[in-house]
Image (cartoon, rainbow, N blue to C red):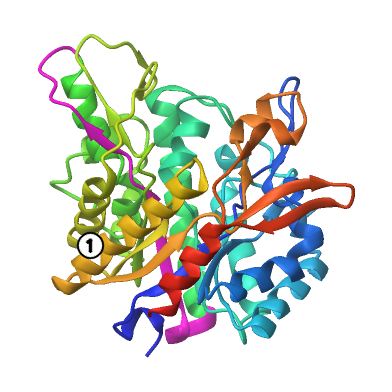
Amino acid sequence: MTWHQDGRLHYALGIEDTFVPQTRPGERALDEYELTEHYARVHEDLGLAAGVGAELLRWGIPWYRISPELGRWDWDWLDRAIARFSEVGVRPVIDLLHYGTPLWLDGEFAHPDFPARFAEYAVAVAERYADTVTDYTPVNEPMIHAEFCGELAYWPPYLSGEAGVVRMVAALADGFARAQHGIAEVLGERAVFVHVESTTRLAGDLEGEHRERVELLRERRYVVEDLVTGRVRDGHPLLGHLQSQGMSDALLERLASTPVRPDVMGVNYYPQHSTRLFRDGEHFRGGFVDPAPTRNDGVEGLVDVLTTYEDRYGAPVALTETCVEGGVQERIAWMDASVAAIEELRAAGRQVVAYTWWPLFDMYEWTYRHASGPRAESRLPMGLYDLVESPDGLERRRNPVADAFARHAGRR
């Protein structure tokens, strides 16, 4: 029996692990491990996670760094990091893809070999660490990947429109499924797969010009998970749309006939950002209203996404990311309220198996990629530890949010 089957609520943390290494004029590389100095401080950082009572740590591999050239692997840093997990007694849940592809993969997710190359990488990792690592998230937030890379032209390969987003959906679903099948062949029944999706909630009652578009978006937010779990077949509301936008019948049939399913369905929920409010008369930019108003639905929104995903996919659910941006007391208040909501769900018989505060220490806004100032201007105060500039680099300074997390984790 593994952690998701033992009936307890497990407390987890995450270290922000977005990697978009490609550059072009006006856009610099975004590597959160580099920005937060995690590469140099991984030994210390994993100790911090253990020190506040985390049992699990969502933690990503920088694919572009361990695969600097096609066919060449550089395992040195990763070997030391994985060994440290065992030393501190924290169980890693490995993010294989948290947005970035290697620099040698021209066209990134649009490259025809992306699914096969991604699966090769996944299997290489699973084989190397088969004795110590069993828990994997093949693709973190695949719909954010698809929208940012395929619809909004915000990240490479800078596609736009519905055909672009469907092209990304097809590539990501194909790579996702191949990677999970490959890992399962290596690890067998020991493998634990935590699927993780962003949970964009689309609120508002529309009767006018955008109603059909919003209904499409409401269905589309599930589409990658629906594809990999074999749900997209005759009768699925998006089947015809995917076909009309270029997704091949052969891929649709392969995904439907050889599904991969989550042992745990993870949902990422940020009360300040996860609910978008659509109104008649607003102007659309790609899939979103411009500007995109949000509404803070607090624990009501959290309960909605946890129960919706549990019911839809028939698997235990985990809150795999949550926090609020703001002061220490605001963060503690949200932690207390969200933990209480999950305990109520569990008392009512819902299978919520993990609570994840994201991140362990502060992170840097994704807009850093398009900015020109120093990293300090992009810092987001979200963690249990503040990142403080010092002559020796970024000091990790514990704040009271860490005490609140330790208090909750100690009650398990």
- Regarding residue 262, the answer to whether it shows in the image is no
State the residue in front, 224 or 137.
137
> Residue visible at 76% across and 74% down?
79
- Quarter occupied by residue 270: top left
The magenta-colored residue range is 186-209
- Quarter occupied by residue 214: top left
Q: Is residue 24 left or right of residue 329?
A: right
> Up-down: is 290 above or below 103?
above
- Quarter occupied by residue 231: bottom left
| Residue lying farthest to the right in this orientation | 391
**Residue 365, horizontal then vertical, whole percent:** 60, 36
> Up-down: is 391 above or below 84?
above
Look at label 1 and name its amino acid: Glu
State the residue in front, 298 or 38.
298
User: Tag 1: Cα neighbours inside 10 Å, few (<14), some, or many (≥20)?
Assistant: many
| Placement of the C terminus among the 4 image quadrants | bottom left
State the residue in front, 280 or 102.
280
